[in-house]
Image (spheres, helix red, strand yellow):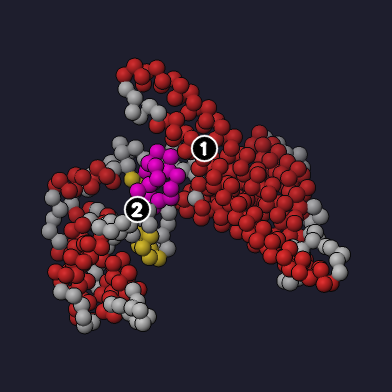
Amino acid sequence: MASDPILHIKDSYYFEVPSWLAPSHRESLQDFPDVWIRLDPAYQLWEANLVHAKLSELSKGVPSETDFIHNWEHWQHEPGNHGKPVRRYLKELAEEKTKDDKPANPWAESWPEAQELVTVAEYRETAQPWSPKKIEGYNEVLSGKILIPQPFGQLRNLYQKDSGFCISRFMVLETLVAIVMVLVFTWYASRLKKSIVPKGRVTHLLDAFVCYLREQVIRPGIGHGADKFVPVLLTMFFFVLGCNLLGMIPWLGAPTASFSVTLSLAFATLVIGMGAGALKFGPVGVWLNLIPHMDLPLIIGIPIKIMLFVIELAGLFIKHAVLGVRLLANMVAGHLVLLGIVALGVEMSGWNLILTLPIIVGSAVLFSCLELFVAFLQAYIFTFLSSLFIGASTHHH
C-alpha cells in the first residue's frame, strides 16, 4: 500500500484521483487488468496447482499437491510473505542450500520453466466467473486509480514491478517536466536570438533566473572554467524545481520525494565532477587531487597521505549521498507536516471540528506557502552545492 493516499509520497504505477473522477465499473473477470487478476487469491491458487503439475512433469521429488499447497499457504502466513504468489515461494526454495552447499530442493530449480507455461489469458478462458460481491469490492478499491499502461514489463502489484521495464508515476511526471523544459527553453532561446534585450514578462522572468544562477551561483562556486558547466547545472536547477513544484499539485506528487530520483541526480553531479577532473588531471590525477598539498618528509608524508586519501574518498561519496538525501528529506518533511496538520481534523466532529477547522485550514495554507518556498530553495541549494562539488573536483586543492 502507499505510505499515504493523500500526499502521494511513495511512487506507484498508477495515478490516484477522487473516485468520482475515475470510477471503476468493471462488470466481469474479463474487464480487470492482468496485474489485479494476479493478485486475486483464486487466481494464485489456480496458478499454484498448475505450476505444481508442471513441476511434477519436469522434476522428481516434488511433494504431493496437498503438501505443496499446504506448505505454500503456510509460507504466506509468515511475516512479509502475505499475498505473495507461488513463484516467489519456489524462488526462495530454489535458493535454499544444505550444509554441504548443495540445493536443498533441487526440484524447485525448474520453477521458471513451469511458471512460463502459466498465463493470465489462460485463466480468463478457463476460470469460473467472479461473484458480483467480489467484483463490487474490487471496483470500490480500483475507483480513482488510473493505471499506467505497461507495454515493456509486468507488474507484481500496483507498487512493485515483477519483470521488464515498468513505467511508474514519477517517471511520467519527470518526462513531463523534461518536455516542458525543452519547449520553454527552446522558445526562450528563439526570443533571445531575435533581440539582445529580453522582451516580455516570461522572458524577463527566465532571464532573471538564468543570469542570477550563472553569475551568483555557478561561476563563484566552480571558479575558472565554470561556463562549460552552466548548461548542465541550469538544467539540474529547473528540473529539480519542476519536480518539486509538481508536489504542490493535487494527486500528482513530487518525484524528488523518491530516493531513486534524488540519488540519481547526486550521482550525476559526482560523475560530471570526477569526469571533468579526469579530463583535466588525468584518470589517476583526479583521485590524487583529493589529497591536499603538504610538504612533509617522505617517511611521515606517505602514511599521512594514505590516511587522508581514504578519508577524502569516503567524504567524496558521503557528501554526494547527503546531497541526494538532503533534497529528499526536505521535500518529504513538508508533506509529512502538512499531513499531520490535516489529520488533526480526521477524528474530530461536532463543535470540536467547527472550532478547530479555521486553525487547521489556516495552518495548511501557511505550510503550503512554506512548501512553495522550499521547492525553490532546495533547487537553489542543490545547484549551489553541485557547483561547489564540481569546482572541488576540477581545481587543485
Q: Distance between the residues labelled 2 and 1?
A: 25 Å
The reply, left or right, for residue 331 in relation to residue 280 is left
Numbered badge on residue 158 = 2
Binning the other alpha carbons within 10 Å of mark 1 as few (below 14), some (14 to 19) or many (20 upward) gives some
Secondary structure of the residue carrying tag 1 is helix
Q: Which amino acid does label 2 sit on?
A: Leu
Q: What residue type is labelled 1?
A: Gly
Residue at the (73%, 68%) spot, across then down: 306
Residue 263 rendering spot, x and y as whole percentages: 56, 55
Numbered badge on residue 334 = 1
Secondary structure of the residue carrying tag 2 is loop
Residue at the (67%, 58%) spot, across then down: 315
Residue 188 rendering spot, x and y as whole percentages: 66, 44
Earlier-in-chain disc, 2 versus 1? 2
Give the answer, above or below, for where 83 lies relative to 106.
above
Give the answer, above or below, for where 22 lies relative to 52.
above
Residue at the (76%, 52%) spot, across then down: 222
In magenta segment, residue 5:
yes
The reply, left or right, for residue 169 in relation to residue 65 is right
The stretch in magenta equals: 1-16
